């Protein structure tokens, strides 16, 4: 991805650097050749060349670009899971994924980790973004997701011929699990997404269903993936399934809905991050009925909302790490609503705005394994910056409103916001 050339100075804003410390008023951020040279209170005006580009933050907030930690660019706002398999050919889904990536960037998300991809689109979307073919967040790519036969993503009897082929690699036993990971290695993914546990969203499983994959299959996935330097995560709601994943050596936990004390210990011991993806549950409860979700499914989402909020609070209070990612790409939880996850964590889960911003910036970059490059506004980091007209720490919902964005910058280049239209 191209870096800016020359010097840019951002002034007249409050700095929230992503490390969780108190905001710094009247801050100045100096960017040289796409990299942050300084970020802080002191005025460095004397050392700035007169022809430097200047951006006025209008008394608003200067913060790191957001990181969406559970992004599905290929999920095209479907009302039913099986639409992912049967509605469009891969060619069209690829175009939709590119549009979703552009939208995410415009929403202030300068980086994202995929939580699973249809076909191998994410890998090529990532390359296209890096090569400047299309705009989007810096991406950590997943591939097809791994699921046990008859598990969460395999509920249709064979005669219906809905195999979810684009979305999942179905496995029976550790040998097939190893083979599936090796296929993903060749595809070039960075994250292996699995389905160890159930979900009320599918007809044959529920939120407490543990064995959509056996421990042996999960362990085989981790061994093979780690052998090839890939990371492993999984859809983990049920208590035992979370512990199986942590014992098998997972690098992250998605949802972590019903974690118990033993699971929390395992999580903290290796400092494994968890991405709760909770606004999805609220959106399913609120808007599910208009898209035909059954009462059984909606009741399931109510339970996971309460359980997931409690687990998220416990993890953060115990010193664990949470990523902010929202599983967007369903009709009731469409792309573009990404920052609703952040407001939800403040207004419903009870985190402070600064805690949520740190989760959504620094921790997101850590999950991607790229915290040395971005995620905070500090000297030496890439200038992935979001400038918002308004005090985000006082009103986190400002992040939901793109019309308030002065600039979304990647590597010092203004990609969206009012500044982009000057
Ligand atoms: Zn997901």
Image: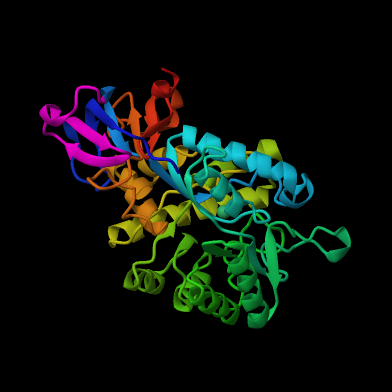
Q: Position of residue 390 (x, y in %)?
A: 31, 25
Which residue is at 42% across, 25% downward? 417
Vertical order, 329 against 268 (above or below): above
Quadrant of the rendered image holding ligand 1: bottom right
Q: Residue at x 33, y 30 (%)?
A: 387
Q: Residue furthest top?
A: 422
Q: Quadrant of residue 220?
A: bottom right
Indicate how the structure is coloured in the image. rainbow
**Which quadrant of the view contains residue 147?**
bottom right
Q: Residue furthest right?
A: 159
| Residue 391 coordinates in the image, percent (x, y) | 28, 28
Residue 36 counted in the magenta span: yes
Between residue 106 and residue 202, name the one nearer to us.
Answer: 106
Q: Residue at x 60, y 78 (%)?
A: 217
Q: Residue at x 23, y 34 (%)?
A: 30
Q: Which residues are magenta?
A: 26-52
Q: Position of residue 71 (x, y in %)?
A: 53, 49
Query: Relative to residue 270, is residue 84 drawn left or right?
Result: right
Picture quadrant where residue 209 is located: bottom right
Residue 202 location (% of width, % of height) = 68, 57
Q: Does any portion of residue 311 appear in the rendered image?
A: no
Q: Is residue 164 left or right of residue 60?
A: right
Q: Quadrant of the C terminus?
A: top left
């Amino acid at each position: 991805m191209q870096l800016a050339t020359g010097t840019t100075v951002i002034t007249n804003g409050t700095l929230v650097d992503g490390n969780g410390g108190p905001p710094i008023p009247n801050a100045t951020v100096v960017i040289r050749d796409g990299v942050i040279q300084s970020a802080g209170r002191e005025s460095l005006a004397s050392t700035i060349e007169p022809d430097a580009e200047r951006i006025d933050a209008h008394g608003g907030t200067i913060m790191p670009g957001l990181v969406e930690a559970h992004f599905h660019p290929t999920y095209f706002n479907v009302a039913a899971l099986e639409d992912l398999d049967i509605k469009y050919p891969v060619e069209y889904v690829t175009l939709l994924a590119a549009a979703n990536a552009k939208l995410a960037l415009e929403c202030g998300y300068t980086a994202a980790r995929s939580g699973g991809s249809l076909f191998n689109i994410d890998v090529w979307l990532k390359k296209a973004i890096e090569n400047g073919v299309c705009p989007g967040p810096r991406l950590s790519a997943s591939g097809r997701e791994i699921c046990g036969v008859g598990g969460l993503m395999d509920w249709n009897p064979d005669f219906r011929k809905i195999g979810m082929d684009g979305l999942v690699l179905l496995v029976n036993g550790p040998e097939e699990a190893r083979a599936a990971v090796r296929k993903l290695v060749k595809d070039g993914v960075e994250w292996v997404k699995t389905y160890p546990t159930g979900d009320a969203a599918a007809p044959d499983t529920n939120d407490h269903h543990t064995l959509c994959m056996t421990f042996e299959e999960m362990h085989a996935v981790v061994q093979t993936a780690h052998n090839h330097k890939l990371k492993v995560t999984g859809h983990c709601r049920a208590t035992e399934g979370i512990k199986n994943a942590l014992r098998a050596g997972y690098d992250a936990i998605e949802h972590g809905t019903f974690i118990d004390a033993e699971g929390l210990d395992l999580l903290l011991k290796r400092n494994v991050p968890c991405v709760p993806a909770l606004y999805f549950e609220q959106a399913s409860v609120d808007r599910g009925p208009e898209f035909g979700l059954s009462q059984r499914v909606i009741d399931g989402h109510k339970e996971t909302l309460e359980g997931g909020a409690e687990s998220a609070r416990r993890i953060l209070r115990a010193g664990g790490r949470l990523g902010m990612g929202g599983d967007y790409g369903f009709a009731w939880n469409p792309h573009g609503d990404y920052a609703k996850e952040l407001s939800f964590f403040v207004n419903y889960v009870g985190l402070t705005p600064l805690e949520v911003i740190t989760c959504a910036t620094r921790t997101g970059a850590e999950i991607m394994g790229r915290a040395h490059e971005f995620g905070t506004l500090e000297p030496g980091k890439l200038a992935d910056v979001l400038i918002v007209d308004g005090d985000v720490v006082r009103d986190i919902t400002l992040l939901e409103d793109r019309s308030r964005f002065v600039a979304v910058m990647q590597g010092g280049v203004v990609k969206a916001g009012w500044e982009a239209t000057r």
